[in-house]
Image (cartoon, rainbow, N blue to C red):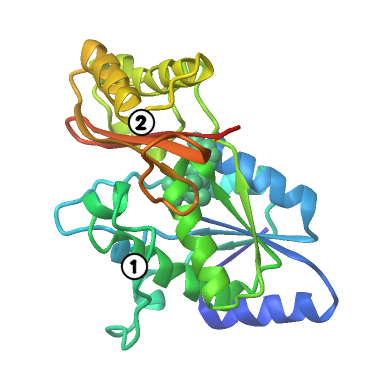
Amino acid sequence: MRVITTIKEMQELILQQKSQGKTVGFVPTMGFLHEGHLTLLNRARQENDIVVLSIFVNPLQFGPKEDYAEYPRDFERDRALAESEMVDFLFYPSVEEMYPTDLSVRVTVQERTDVLCGSSRPGHFDGVATVITKFFNIIMPTRAYFGKKDAQQVAVIEGLISDFNIPVNLVAVDIVRENDGLAKSSRNVNLLPNERKEAPVLYQSLQVAAGAIDEGERDPNKLIHLIREEIGKESSGVIDYVQIYSYPQLKPLEKLEGTIIIALAVKFTKVRLIDNFITKID
Ligand code: AMP
């Protein structure tokens, strides 16, 4: 595995590989790797000749009051994990390398961001879309792997790829969970011990809603109420949102039909957690 820190070297190496007809699988991350990330890497390894992992905590996607400084980082641990997943190139640029000057052009996302994390984190998806556009131009991947844990991100990147005609295939990978159901996240280490015990309620509340859907419930408001009640019973966290939309369009629904997402975000003392459930209603 080679660790690459400059854009120029990364582009040269990729062009070399592509000139030999190699396919490139790309997994963008902010590091502090866990099994969720490793699942994406594993899938990329199976489906491509070359695997590129990027580790970059992108300041552009954090709001001024968000956890950019506290975001966990451990490069040496990540490097060893990447090596064991047989990554070929670990792209690890500095902020100065990615943003040497103020950008004269930024990607602004117009659709799918007025709800969920887009409304609680203004500018977040513009930052994500901008950095991913840069990465796509640097890595030129055949396939790019994203987790459904960040389902709104998947919806936004799908729009970016389609609207800008970017020649990359997006692969969306299922959420990887702890044994107690908590979605794996780099941020979980910033939960206080009692909060870590309560946090599986996020998933449990989604399961309660899934059960109600199975029993025929089709009213989004009733489901939202059920989820809020469930979280309130078990957790000291403050609900940021519980919302239900069509997926991936993220439009409101009066009655559940088609593919839908139930998504939620809960704020704990030092960390805000998200989770979701996507299902198709016949
Ligand atoms: P992050 O480092 O948090 O930006 O995540 C990098 C990629 O890993 C994103 O595409 C995430 O959606 C994905 N990811 C993070 N956690 C999980 C998880 N628990 N299951 C599946 N994918 C995940």
Q: Position of residue 66 (x, y in %)?
A: 20, 51
Which labelled disc corresponds to residue 220?
Answer: 2
Secondary structure at numbered mark 1? helix
Q: Position of residue 149 (x, y in %)?
A: 47, 40
The answer to whether residue 35 is left or right of residue 225 is right
Q: Position of residue 12 (x, y in %)?
A: 66, 82
Secondary structure at numbered mark 2? helix
Pick the front one: 227 or 131 = 227
Name the residue type under label 2.
Answer: Pro
Determine the residue located farthest toward the right in the rendered image.
20
Count of marks, rendered view: 2
The answer to whether residue 262 is left or right of residue 103 is right
Q: Which residue is found at the position 48% from the left and 67% from the top? A: 132
Q: Position of residue 173 (x, y in %)?
A: 61, 43
Pointer 2 residue Cβ closer than 8 Å to ligand 1 = no
Mark 2 and mark 1 lie on one chain; the one further toward the N terminus is 1
The answer to whether residue 33 is left or right of residue 74 is right
> Callout 1: 10 Å neighbours few (<14), some, many (20+)?
many
Quadrant for the N terminus, please.
Answer: bottom right
Pick the front one: 173 or 11 = 173
Q: Which residue is found at the position 42% from the left and 67% from the top? A: 129
